[in-house]
Amino acid sequence: MALKIGIAGWSLLPPSAEIPGALDELIYSSTSQALVDAGITIAEIDGVCMASSDLNDGRAISTMTLTGSTGSFHKSEMRVCNDALAAVWMGAAEVGSGAAQTLIVCAWNKFSDVVDPAAIPALALEPSMHRSLKYHPDAILSLRESQESGTIVLTDAAPLQPNDTAAAVVITTDGHPKAGDLVLSGFGSSTGPYLRPGEPVLKPTQSAVAAALKFAAVPISDVRRIFVGGLHRISSADIAEALSVPESSIVREDPQTADLGYAAGLVALVHALELGIDGPTLVISAAGLGVESANAVLVEMK
Amino acid sequence: MTSNAAAILGFGQTKFRTVREDVSGPELVFEAVSAALADSQMDINDIDAVVFASAPEVFEGVYEPDRWSIEAFGGVGKPVVRVHTGGATGGSAAIAGARLIESGLYETVLVVGLQRTSETPDAQAVFTTIFDPIFEQDVQLNVITGIALVASRQMEYFGLTEDHMAWVSKKNFDNALLNPFAHLHKNITIEDVKNSRPLAWPLRLLHTCPRSDGAAAVVMTSGANAKRHKSVAWMRGAGHATDVYRIGDRIKDADSDLAIPRALGWACDDAYREAGITDPLNQLDVVEVYAPFANLEIGYYESMGLAPSGRGIELVETGATALGGKIPVVPSGGCMTANPIGATGLVRFGEAALQVMGRAGDHQVDGARVALATACGGIDQFYTAAVLASDPE
Amino acid sequence: MTETVRIPGEWHIGYQYTIGTFASAFFDGLRKGEIWGSLCEQNGEVAVPPKSFNEQAFVPTDKLVQVGLNGTIQAVTIVTAPFAGSPDVPYAVIYVKLDGATSSIANYMHGVDLGDGTTLPDALSIESPVHAVFSPEPEGRVTDFWFEPGVA
């Protein structure tokens, strides 16, 4: 089943240690700029699909206070709590179902408002068996790598660099007059087990990529570049090997240790769009303590 | 309606309680998912993707509870997305599931809702933190005071009285006695409501909802696949709409009043348009409204188009929304008798599906063929609406 | 039958919320006994507290504007149930539309005998006049002012 989603415009507040302004002002800045870029007015937008984390945002229902800045007043609002590539495929579903013609997909992160962002991942450990042990949450990934490789894996990764950012992409039906010459044509997602080792670390990522390519009927050999969001502790060589692509096709966030929260996947997508698409381009992300929540979308020229 | 409509095959819910000490969070999820799969006559391997619904994770005290529960809903190896729009979460997740199917991305989707409000000692303290940390938390705005402020305008706008609220409370508590899954099974009188503990004028304890532990799950599939099943509920239309955050920006203007949440009207307009409903009072057979407070339900009658402007109280005065009345509202007892926040909207959706499938048990509305289910998040800010029917068109 | 175990836990995450220049101007004003809002020329909204963009018109707001200290009650509740961190009950929270504003702002109402909190005193009924009173010791929080009955 083919589903092609138009891309009308985008914007990005480039990741940095601190972007001044209130969080809703950052979001408004990126969503309003994406509309300008798309040549679409707010009145023409049917809804907004967003990804955000309550803990990163410091609000128990973060979108409740931030919603106005996303552009969702008097419109549909869908909010996911996963990497923003999940918001991309959820938004694609809203457009693809006929429920919306035009949609803003947006995500943000403002770690400069959080006193200690590194304290948040440990709260994703279930409380009775794991959190009580008080080990570093990165040990989850190390244990998986150890099981996979049969070797000792040290948990000594350099700390991530918390970043502020905001990104927005305006998507439309394929035939929309404001749609450009790029389309989202493949959507894949997969999830691994919680905490426990037992399957290859990059299996969910491989599955998500395979699903996106299958959906678009594009072979991996046709893919020109792969933009990566998240997956901080996994090397480009390992990703390339897992996906059977040359390492030169992998494009990472610079630096690779920049922590963009749930915005990582959308920032990677906007990077891809800004650099120019010259053939089938994958954007992938994987989040979760064991990078077990993986998403992939394929961008193609019409 | 689009030709690619999604359909609901089955619904499962746990018994709702203040604390389910016998199970962990994931075990609660497993219970609901198992019930939904059995109700749908489906296997976990039939599921292509999962939408997980849970509202603030501060309640469970586990960040990213979708991962924590993944084995419990059979999500390993599948696409999983968590939806969270506050109280509207369960309603948004149901719409998300439908859109994933209608777009052709996935054939069969499991929608799961979980909330354990018992894990944190003071839910109202959580509810204070949902408010704007700059202007509003310091003046003790929370859900109860927020809805009390709405009630004060309803008294002004359409003449809401304690009698109206007491009638709605008693109706819903009476309905809950017919629903084995309801959290509160209490025989109450109008006098009990009027004499219950005052919380925030004009609201009293029996105008409000309990905090509940519980989970719910719905199995949805494509129209083509649904035709192979005997008992299905068709998703005929859906809408969701958002209002501005600040209550002070929407108290009153030329077109609207905080007394009658306009965003529910917007959501219903979209759902009705998709479903071809032009006269909701006569075309709907039953409504599962997400109204955790008695006064809200009355205001919603108008938002949902069941009553003309300012006349929602007439449905109370004529008993029209009681079981057996012209348009029964929450025959299940609704949120006032069980409120596992992030799952609540999905319970409304599932109950509406059961009604049009004729499988609602003792609280079945005779001959129900078209139902409306809603959900609400924030202080009257996010709304979802879904029209479910026994026939595809 | 096994006795069920519950594992205690707590979350501690600190935040320093950035509020931006518009909101900062509001708190600055409170120190001087002034209340500031923002004007959106496109739809005429004078929002109090101010905001740097108008989410309904989806345009930046044009400027900060000072509003009056007198206003009318638009919504009211008297809280009789204590919540974590709340003042002593009963206390009243009201939304007030200040002169010159199109939106309303929430704050405490002082200076009215609330009795046991189960009946509404006349001074608290909707459309009653109130005025802002400022704390002599501002802390840079919204509680640097409150409302009292009548016109200043």
Image (cartoon, helix red, strand yellow):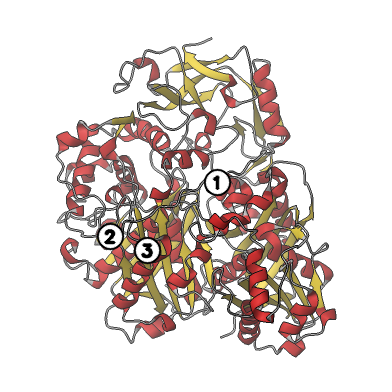
Q: Respond whether the residues carrying marks 2 and 1 are from the same subunit.
A: no
Disc 2 versus disc 1: nearer the observer: 1
Quadrant of residue C128 in the image? Answer: top left
**Is residue A175 something that shows in the picture?**
no
Q: Element at badge 2? A: loop
For label 3, the residue is B28
Identify residue for label 1: C11
Q: Residue furthest right?
A: A248
Residue B207 higher or lower than A185, as above or below = above
Check if mark 2 and mark 3 are on a common chain.
yes
Number of the label disc, if any, that sits on residue A218: none
Question: Label 1 is placed on what type of residue?
Answer: Trp
Image quarter of residue A263: bottom right
What is the C-alpha distance between the residues marked 3 and 1?
A: 23 Å
- Residue B41 lies, in percent from the top left, at 31, 81
Neighbour tally class for label 2: few under 14, some 14-19, many 20 plus, Cα within 10 Å: some
Residue B247 higher or lower than B19, as above or below: above
* Residue C65 in picture, x, y percent from top left: 68, 26
Q: Residue A248, position in %: x, y?
A: 85, 80
Residue drawn at (55%, 46%) of the image:
C11
- In the rendered structure, find residue B15 and report the number of the disc placed on it: 2
| Nearer-the-camera pick, B358 or A283 | A283
